[in-house]
Amino acid sequence: MDHVRKVGVRPELYKDDAHKVELQSRNGVWQFDEVVRLIDRSDGELRLTRRKILRLHRFAIQDIYQCAGRFREWPVAIRGSLHKPPEARYIKGLVAEMCATANREMDWSPSKTAAFLLWRLNWIHPFGGGNGRTSRALGYYALCVRYGLRFPGRFTIAEQIDRDRRRYQDALEDADAAWREHSLDVSLMESLIEDLLERQLAYLDETPLDPL
């Protein structure tokens, strides 16, 4: 589920709510495995592309919605938010620009890069469903690549956000407000990511950090 409810076109493939939960659980494992694969093959370089993002999205909503792995071609509205997502015709260009910015800004901290991607993908809202799950996977991938580590810990950042969305939603809204004033400010999201990472590492097994 994304940070707020949406209206749009996303035909469901699941039979009922129980089936949807089952598929979400399976897809969460598939998507996390794909994130790990991308991290391990990164050689420390982010190299984000639209293709990688579409692949992460496909894993997120496979067999749940028909739009898995495809950008939306219809308008959406986010209920309870002042933000109006861009028209579908701008999505490919905006996603490409987002990837180029994240790849280029080597002076950004790992948490700022992750925060930017978490916010910006949600801002673009390029999918008919699964925007939140895809953005969280993307942010975690960027965080690990920029730190040069695949972080251990049983209580991952994405799991923590799913259990308590208030700070996450506030951070998205704060960045949206800054952007409306023509400013890029993802500091609240950056602070949240750093706190969640610290908490994830507090749940360590005996396994040491895995270097890339």
Image (cartoon, rainbow, N blue to C red):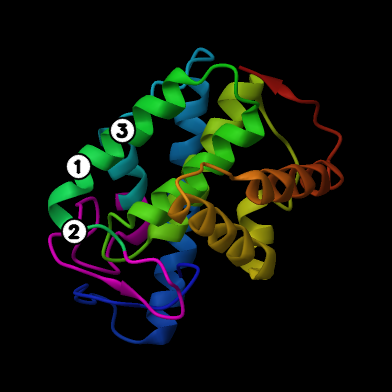
Residue 97: mark in rendering: 3
Say if the magenta span includes residue 100.
no
Residue 87: mark in rendering: 2
Question: What span is colored magenta in the figure?
Answer: 58-84
- Identity, as a three-letter code, of the amino acid under mark 1: Lys
Distance from Cα at disc 3 to Cα at disc 1? 9 Å
Element assignment for label 1? helix
- Identity, as a three-letter code, of the amino acid under mark 3: Glu
Element assignment for label 2? loop
View extreme (top): residue: 43
How many numbered discs?
3
Could you classify mark 1 by the number of other residues whose Cα lies within 10 Å: few (under 14), some (14-19), or many (20 or more)?
Answer: some
Residue 49: mark in rendering: none
Question: Residue 140: horizontal and vertical position, in percent?
Answer: 57, 40
Q: Is residue 51 left or right of residue 81?
A: left
Task: Specify the quadrant that holds the C terminus.
Answer: top right
Residue 48 visible at all: no
Could you classify mark 2 by the number of other residues whose Cα lies within 10 Å: few (under 14), some (14-19), or many (20 or more)?
Answer: some
What residue did someone put label 1 on?
92
Q: Is residue 39 placed above or below 57 in the rendered structure?
A: above
Q: Quadrant of residue 106?
A: top right
